[in-house]
Image (cartoon, rainbow, N blue to C red):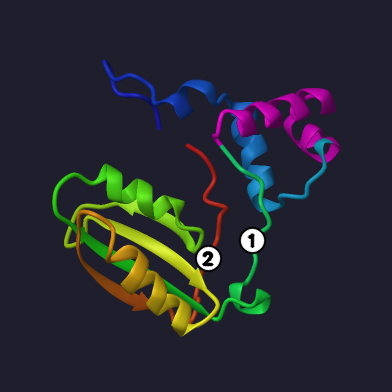
Amino acid sequence: MGLMRGSKPTPAQARLDEHSKVIIEHLQADGRASYAAIAKAVGLSEAAVRQRVQRLLDSGVMQIVAVTDPLQVGFTRQAMIGIRVDGELDAPAAALSELPEVAYVVTTAGSFDLLCEVVCENDEELLDIVSRQIRSLPGVASTETFVYLKLNKQHYNWGTR
């Protein structure tokens, strides 16, 4: 997928060459892949791969993390919370982002202004987060909570463009 004539590249497009894209795709498939194995697949030296990975991490293009099953590490309740805001969205979004139980915050178009995902130990903690923390934020007009019953799919290997 190329750039349209007259359009400017996004920051990610501007700094991702084909080698970096392949490195990312290898790490999406296996975040524990060695630099030596990636170097062999990409056709670069191990040192060059190590430097590229560090630049990608430092620039915020990617993260390397351990993804857990929340149920197996003591978090029995997950939910997505739709939030309607009166006024500007930046302050409520920033405040939500500061809550430790909130794993994900996005500004949306549609019936909600913001969506946030929470990971909680139990329903009591979820109730506290929604009623005492989120609903009390300045600008929050209303919330709707979608409790997760089952995780059917979660993946991070969508590749690059």
**Which segment is the magenta one?**
36-61
Can you say whether 46 is above or below 30 in the image? above
* Residue 110 - label: none
The crowding category of the residue bearing disc 2, from other C-alpha atoms within 10 Å (few below 14, some 14 to 19, many at least 20), is: few
Can you say whether 93 is above or below 37 in the image? below
Q: Amino acid at mark 2?
A: Gln
Can you say whether 125 is above or below 92 in the image? below
Lower position in the chain sequence, tag 2 or tag 1:
1
Residue identified by numbered label 1: 67
Residue identified by numbered label 2: 154
Q: Amino acid at mark 1?
A: Val
Residue 15 point in image, percent of width and height: 53, 22
Quadrant of the rendered structure where residue 34 is? top right
Q: State the residue at coordinates (54%, 34%).
A: 61
Q: In this rendering, would 125 be left or right of 107?
A: right
User: Which label sits in the foreground, 2 or 1?
Assistant: 1
